[in-house]
């Protein structure tokens, strides 16, 4: 306990440009505000509109909650670091941030796969959709995603807790994430690297392959539809999810496979921004602006609020 309390971790990912600190603060504050507001809005609108109480929107609420957790774990501390002279984060705060961020990230990987399966059932077995994706099944799938994500994060965190670090540790990153923290360890990180690759294969690669398989069947089924209008509608229900998957998976797989083979993590800061910052901001936009049901529900929610105020 005494060893950890004396350790210092310095986050210097954005300190190379001191004259741009106010600009960085403004940008990241606006990004966090947009991500938080957008995901809260989607969660509230889906919760209050009974017509949106379907499996697809149930999983979308879970995704929005995860995006809020992801940005809240990373950005507030980043904002604090930007406005103080000493870019310090305590050992316990760093480990907590690492755990929360990794848990949200892992859970989102699994949830995106579950959402792909939901679209597969909806398009390939439309008549059996309500029976297969009933409330119990949806709750079990979402619960499994949250549990597996938490277990995965706890495994990585416990292994990191066994490592030794220097008195002063400079993290060249925006926040405490597994790869840059491992780079600072004084002890051997072989087991950590092996577990990262194993986790990436089990969560990242397998989830990605299951998503690809789901969409292979989906596209095959859609191509068999004769009606151009029905074909367009079927594609539109999958387009939002497919866009999110493309942005999210590439960054995660790149960041978490690469450290096992390379110690040059400079590029990871840019890639991390895609799934830690850009993705939570874009998800509400992608799902709402491309979805007439969500737009109509938002309009009706605001119209109802105006009528109450009158």
Image: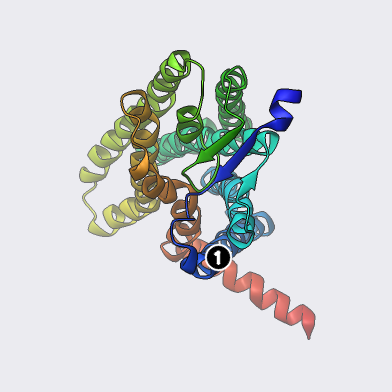
118 vs 11: above or below = above
Extreme residue in the front direction: 167
Q: In which quarter of the view is residue 260 placed?
A: top left
Q: Is residue 51 visible?
A: no
Q: In which quarter of the view is residue 55 placed?
A: top right
- Residue 156 place in picture, x, y as percent: 55, 23
Residue at position x 26%, y 35% in the image: 216
Please rate how many residues cluster around mark 1, counting C-alpha atoms within 10 Å: few if below 14, some from 14 to 19, many from 20. some
- Quadrant where the N terminus sits is top right
Residue situated in front as seen by the camera: 136 or 265:
265
Residue at position x 59%, y 64% in the image: 33
- Residue 110 place in picture, x, y as percent: 48, 32
Q: Is residue 150 visible?
A: yes
State left or right for residue 218 relative to residue 32: left
Residue at position x 64%, y 43% in the image: 89
- Residue 296 place in picture, x, y as percent: 54, 69
Element on which disc 1 rests: helix
- Residue 185 place in picture, x, y as percent: 51, 24
State left or right for residue 283 relative to residue 140: left
- Colouring chosen for the image of the structure: rainbow
- Quadrant where the C terminus sits is bottom right
Residue situated in front as seen by the camera: 103 or 129:
103
Residue at position x 47%, y 18% in the image: 192
Question: How many numbered circles are shown?
Answer: 1
Residue situated in front as seen by the camera: 93 or 150:
93
Residue situated in front as seen by the camera: 118 or 144:
144
According to the image, label 1 marks what residue? Answer: 25
């Amino acid at each position: 306990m005494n060893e950890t309390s004396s350790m210092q971790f310095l986050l210097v990912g954005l300190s190379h440009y001191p004259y741009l600190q106010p600009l960085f603060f403004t940008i990241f504050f606006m990004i966090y505000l947009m991500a938080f507001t957008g995901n809260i809005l989607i969660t509230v609108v889906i919760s209050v509109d009974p017509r949106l109480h379907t499996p697809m929107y149930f999983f979308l609420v879970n995704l929005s909650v995860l995006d809020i957790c992801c940005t809240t774990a990373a950005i507030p501390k980043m904002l604090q670091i930007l406005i103080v002279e000493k870019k310090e984060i305590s050992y316990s705060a760093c480990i907590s941030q690492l755990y929360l961020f990794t848990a949200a990230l892992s859970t989102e990987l699994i949830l995106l796969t579950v959402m792909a399966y939901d679209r597969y059932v909806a398009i390939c077995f439309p008549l059996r959709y309500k029976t297969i994706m009933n409330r119990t099944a949806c709750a079990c799938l979402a619960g499994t995603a949250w549990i597996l994500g938490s277990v995965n994060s706890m495994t990585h965190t416990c292994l990191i807790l066994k490592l030794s670090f220097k008195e002063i540790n400079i993290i060249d990153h925006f926040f405490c994430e597994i790869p840059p923290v491992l780079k600072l360890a004084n002890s051997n990180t072989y087991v950590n690297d092996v577990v990262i690759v194993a986790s990436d294969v089990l969560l990242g690669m397998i989830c990605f392959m299951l998503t690809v398989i789901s969409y292979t069947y989906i596209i095959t089924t859609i191509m068999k539809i004769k009606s151009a209008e029905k074909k367009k509608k079927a594609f539109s229900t999958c387009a939002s999810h497919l866009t999110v998957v493309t942005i999210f998976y590439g960054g995660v797989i790149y960041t978490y496979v690469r450290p096992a083979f390379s110690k040059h993590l400079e590029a990871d800061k840019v890639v991390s921004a895609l799934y830690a910052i850009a993705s939570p901001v874009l998800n509400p936009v992608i799902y709402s602006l491309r979805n007439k049901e969500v737009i109509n529900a938002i309009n009706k929610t605001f119209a109802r609020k105006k009528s109450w105020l009158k």
